[in-house]
Image (cartoon, helix red, strand yellow):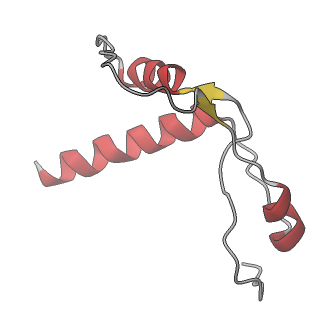
Amino acid sequence: MQRSDFEGPVNIGSEEMISINGLAEMAMEIAGKSLTLNHIPGPQGVRGRISDSTLLRAKLGYAPSAPLRDGMAKTYAWIVEEIAKRA
């Protein structure tokens, strides 16, 4: 593991643009679930998020290399496994 003396906060995430609905749909596909998204009235916020890894690359020499879907699938599999251990 490479060490760094950089102490500031950095964004760590996918540079893939995805909407919140898209993220929810991706999670449902990975989980093999079919759910209804319920949009409730309220203020409209950010329509999607994208991580900027510029500072991460500059200060730590690292950038995520796996697609968001792969990371989500791996995380979901880990969660299922952890729940099974506790059952």
Q: Residue 62: percent from the left, percent from the top?
A: 80, 62
In this rendering, the answer to whether 18 lies above or below 64 is above
Q: Residue 70: percent from the left, percent from the top?
A: 59, 35
Residue 37 occupies quadrant: top left
Q: Nearer the viewer, residue 43 or 40?
A: 43
Q: Residue at x 51, y 37 (%)?
A: 72
In this rendering, the answer to whether 35 lies above or below 5 is above
In this rendering, the answer to whether 73 lies above or below 63 is above
In this rendering, the answer to whether 83 lies above or below 17 is below
Q: Nearer the viewer, residue 55 or 32?
A: 55
Residue 6 occupies quadrant: bottom right
65 displayed left or right of 18: right
Which residue occupies the extreme bottom position in the image?
A: 5
Q: Residue 42: percent from the left, percent from the top?
A: 36, 25
Q: Residue at x 45, y 44 (%)?
A: 75
Which residue occupies the extreme front position in the image?
A: 43
79 displayed left or right of 60: left
Q: Looking at the image, how many numbered discs can be counted on the residues?
A: 0
Q: Residue at x 59, y 30 (%)?
A: 69
Q: Residue 20: percent from the left, percent from the top?
A: 50, 27
Which residue occupies the extreme left position in the image?
A: 87
Q: Residue at x 68, y 35 (%)?
A: 67
- Quadrant containing the N terminus is bottom right
